[in-house]
Image (cartoon, rainbow, N blue to C red):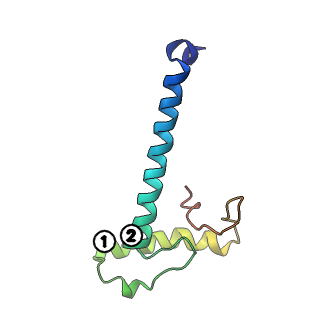
């Protein structure tokens, strides 16, 4: 197999760990942006668009697009809970 001959186990492990860390950082940033900028919370709540006065026209359009994607999934009754329990809305946007 190419991978086993081209890279040793330690190097593959380092690459895997780096990939996992990158994904974690992206998920954290995504969450901060959804909650802090767009008022979309993992609990499934949405801050009223009118209260997000920091958003310009493009930001409001982005928020409406995000809501349009998330709400139909929520309305469909899709189970967005991880195996452990708490409801997480973001997996549709699904991480």
Between marks 1 and 2, how big is the CA–CA gap?
6 Å
- Dots 1 and 2: beta carbons under 8 Å? yes
Which of the two residues, 66 or 44, is positioned nearer the viewer here? Answer: 44
Categorize mark 2 by other alpha carbons within 10 Å: few (<14), some (14-19), many (20+).
Answer: some
Image quadrant containing the N terminus = top right
Quarter in which the C terminus is drawn: bottom right
Q: Nearer the viewer, residue 46 or 66?
A: 46
The answer to whether 73 is drawn above or below residue 48 in the figure is: above
Residue 65 position (above or below residue 30) = below
Residue lying furthest top in this view? 5
Where residue 92 sits in the image (x, y, percent)? 58, 61
**Percent coordinates x, y for residue 76 in the rendering:** 68, 71
Which residue is painted at 59% across and 60% down in the image?
91
- Residue at x 46%, y 82% (from the top left corner): 47
Relative to 4, say whether 60 is above or below.
below
Residue occupied by mark 1:
58
Q: Pointer 2: what residue?
A: 62
Q: Is residue 38 left or right of residue 80?
A: left
23 relative position to 88: left or right: left
Q: Residue at x 51, y 42 (%)?
A: 20
Q: Secondary structure at mark 1?
A: helix
Secondary structure of the residue carrying numbered label 2: helix
Q: Is residue 92 left or right of residue 84?
A: left
Q: Residues within 10 Å of mark 1 (few under 14, many from 20)?
A: few
């Amino acid at each position: 197999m190419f991978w086993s001959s081209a890279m040793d186990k330690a190097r593959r492990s380092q690459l895997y760990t780096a990939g996992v860390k990158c994904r974690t950082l992206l998920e954290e940033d995504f969450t901060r942006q959804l909650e802090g900028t767009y008022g979309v919370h993992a609990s499934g709540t949405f801050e009223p668009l009118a209260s997000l006065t920091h958003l310009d026209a493009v930001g409001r359009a982005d928020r409406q697009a995000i809501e349009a994607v998330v709400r139909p999934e929520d309305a469909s009754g899709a189970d967005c809970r991880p195996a452990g329990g708490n409801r997480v809305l973001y997996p549709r946007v699904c991480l």
